[in-house]
């Protein structure tokens, strides 16, 4: 009689240990992702300010661009805090203009592009294009694509482009590099 009890105790211990390993792995993955997300916006904000202070004729850097990158850094810190519980920070849906967001992103990343001998251009849909979603999460995704295009897209030009359809907005980051194996784009529902 005691053998089955001992065996079930071992089985329970293995199940608990496995559950802890999965939870710890999830937390570590979330922490690593949040740390990665924190580096990009802090670098972009710092270089945008450095660019404004040290490059002749570039004294004016839109503060909205730097503020957006600092907000992205704050989101990464909120994700780090939530990672303690195996989660990420809650999304915050709002209505916003995609064109304004893309211009702010381009301004924040322009110095990084310049130091990499890359021209950065925004090609956006005409007029105001309002969408409903998490503005910072979209900025986070586009910022990551911009960083990759600037670092790995070859010298030349990187284009941040938006196209509006009846019910969706397509955002693309185009560069002159070899590209990813499949197309990566963001489709966002219009407001």
Image (cartoon, rainbow, N blue to C red):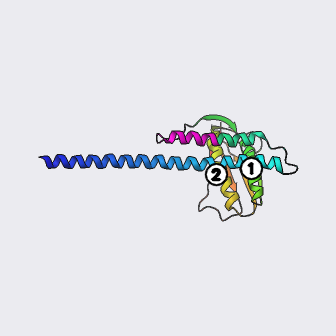
- Apparent side of residue 178 relative to residue 85 in the rendered image (left or right): right
Q: Quadrant of the C terminus?
A: top right
- What is the tally of numbered marks visible in this picture? 2
- Residue topped by disc 1: 47
Nearer the camera: disc 2 or disc 1? 1
> Which residues lie in the magenta part?
73-89
Residue 30 can be seen in this image:
yes
The answer to whether mark 2 and mark 1 are in CB contact below 8 A is: no
How far apart are the two marked residues, 2 and 1, measured between alpha carbons?
16 Å
Badge 1: how crowded within 10 Å, few (<14), some, or many (20+)?
Answer: some
Residue 189 can be seen in this image:
no
The verdict on residue 134 being magenta is no
User: Which element is circle 2 on?
Assistant: helix
Residue 24 point in image, percent of width and height = 43, 47
Residue 169 point in image, percent of width and height = 66, 45
The residue at the point 77 percent across, 39 percent down is 63
The residue at the point 81 percent across, 47 percent down is 52
Chief secondary structure of the magenta span? helix
User: Which element is circle 1 on?
Assistant: helix
Q: Nearer the viewer, residue 70 or 159?
A: 70
The residue at the point 36 percent across, 46 percent down is 19
Mark 2 / mark 1, whichever is N-terminal? 1
- Residue topped by disc 2: 144
């Amino acid at each position: 009689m005691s053998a089955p009890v001992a065996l079930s105790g071992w089985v329970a211990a293995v199940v608990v240990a496995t559950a802890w390993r999965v939870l710890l792995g999830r937390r570590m993955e979330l922490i690593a992702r949040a740390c990665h997300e924190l580096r990009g916006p802090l670098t972009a904000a710092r270089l945008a300010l450095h660019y404004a202070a040290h490059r002749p004729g570039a004294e004016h850097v839109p503060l909205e661009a730097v503020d957006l990158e600092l907000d992205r850094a704050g989101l990464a810190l909120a994700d780090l805090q939530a990672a303690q519980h195996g989660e990420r920070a809650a999304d915050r849906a709002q209505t916003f203009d995609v064109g304004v967001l893309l211009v702010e992103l381009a301004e924040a990343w322009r110095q990084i592009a310049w130091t990499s001998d890359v021209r950065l251009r925004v090609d956006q849909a005409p007029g105001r294009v309002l969408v409903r979603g998490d503005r910072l999460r979209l900025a986070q995704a586009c910022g990551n694509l911009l960083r990759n295009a600037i670092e790995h897209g070859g010298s030349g030009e990187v284009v941040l482009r938006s196209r509006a359809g009846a019910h969706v907005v397509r955002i693309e980051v185009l560069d002159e590099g070899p590209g990813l194996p499949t197309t990566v784009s963001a489709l966002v529902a219009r407001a």
